[in-house]
Amino acid sequence: MIRRDIENILIKLANQYPVVTITGPRQSGKTTLIKHIFSDKKYVNLETPDIRQFAVSDPRGFLDQYDNAILDEIQRAPDLLSYIQPIVDENKEPGRFIITGSQQFEVLNNISQSLAGRTALLKLLPLSIAEIKDAFDVSSIDKLIYNGFYPRIYDTNIEPHQAIGDYIVTYVERDIRQLILIKDLNLFEKFLKLCAGRIGQLLNLQSLANDTGISHTTARSWISILEASYIIFLLPPWFNNFSKRLIKSPKLYFYDVGLASYLLGIENEKQVFRDPLRGNLFENLIIIEVLKYRFNKGKKSNLYFYRDSKGLEIDLIYEAGRNIFPIEIKSGATVSEDYFKNLKKFLRIDKALSAPYGGAVFYGGAVFYGGNEIQHRTDFKVYPATKVSEIIGAFFE
């Protein structure tokens, strides 16, 4: 078993809250993690039909039998949460219930209402580079992009194209069908592939709808479901005026770059290098690695991108309080001066950007690139993809 970086914060919160809730994509390692850490607790999988029927038909009897337990895939019996609330209100013993789910619970009202203030919330994404680099070769960026980071691929050495294809059929399509009625599954698969073809681009629902052959309303619904199911990640724009964030388009990425590669039709590592979207896939890889670092520390996303009306764009803005850390992402392995052009422009306007904050602190900025060496330039440092966790941690921990 690969040790997960989220373990420390998970144990800490289980000693503070009566309920700990862990969400994340299917097959991200949630069950393996909690069964390992909480091996003394009863384990209940609510995907099992007879167990689920027991929980749904007799929730009080179910919780009498499965007190102080792990409840896996809670979205299959969400009404249980309303019965857990009075139990933990009466006895606030820490770590009484460990709950997992494959949907983002903040979008499901019954969960946020039932356990508000009673549960700690964590998100577990697939493996990070930092978690696998001691046991696996991470020197090839193209291999990382092709493989993705689902634990099963690394635990069983299964061929990634086969594993991800099975994953889409077994989990993604099944989960989506549980949430919404899809009359034409082929149309939904086309929509998924079109999303992959738009990695790193501004989300344009009308364009997606037109190219798929569905309505704008349906496209919006499908995007929301994919986001809630941890398939796609929407990166919002950064503005010095916070209210503007609500009215501008986000950029579209995938929580797992290997899944995106599969949807683009990439069938082996060599095809990654020749793919016209390789730069976009590398950008996806870095952004999600930073997001994994945040989630593994028990923190929320603080990630944005910057784009102004004059075309100046910064791939990633890491915001920590009043601290702003701009990051450029370049897939090339050879550093050129062009890598720093937008960072220099961005930092020249820092006074105008920071004024509404009352003086934001800009940490100079950095470049993550496709090479393997750290380079110290006059104004900026250049880091390889394998150093994401170390660099972010050094600046903000």
Image (cartoon, helix red, strand yellow):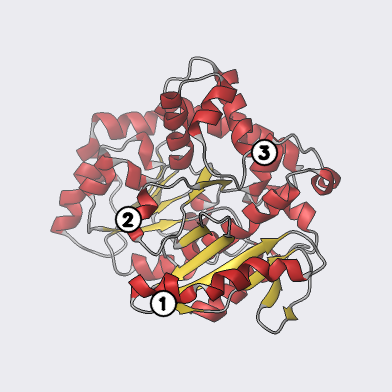
| Among the two numbered marks 1 and 2 on one chain, the one whose residue lies closer to the N terminus | 2
| Residue depicted at x 49% and y 59% | 304
Mark 1 element type: loop
For mark 3, give the secondary structure: helix
| 10 Å crowding of disc 2: few (<14), some (14-19), many (20+) | few
Instruction: Answer above or below: position of 251 versus 189.
Output: below
- Judge depth for marks 1 and 3 and give the one in front: 1
Q: Mark 1 points at which residue?
A: 360
**Contact? badges 2 and 3 (CB < 8 Å):** no
On residue 9, the disc is none
First in sequence, mark 2 or 3: give its number: 3
Tell me how far mark 1 sits from mark 3, CA to CA: 43 Å
- Spatial distance from mark 2 to mark 3, Cα to Cα? 39 Å
Q: Which corner quadrant holds the N terminus?
A: bottom right
Q: In the image shown, does 135 or 389 lie closer to the viewer?
A: 389
State the residue in front, 249 or 3.
249
Asked if marks 1 and 2 touch (Cβ < 8 Å), the reply is: no
Q: In this view, does 78 lie to the left or right of 286?
A: left
Q: Which residue is drawn at 32% across and 35% down?
A: 77
Instruction: Identify the disc placed on residue 164.
Output: 3
Instruction: Inspect this view and state whether residue 325 appears.
Output: yes
- Cα separation, mark 1 vs mark 2, equals 17 Å
Residue where numbered disc 2 is placed = 243
Q: Give the residue at x 79% y 38%.
A: 267
Q: Which amino acid does label 3 sit on?
A: Ile
| Whether residue 220 is situated above or below residue 345 in the rendered picture | above
Measuring from the top left, give residue 51's x and y in whole percent.
37, 34
Query: In the picture provided, is 258 more to the left or to the right than 5?
Result: right
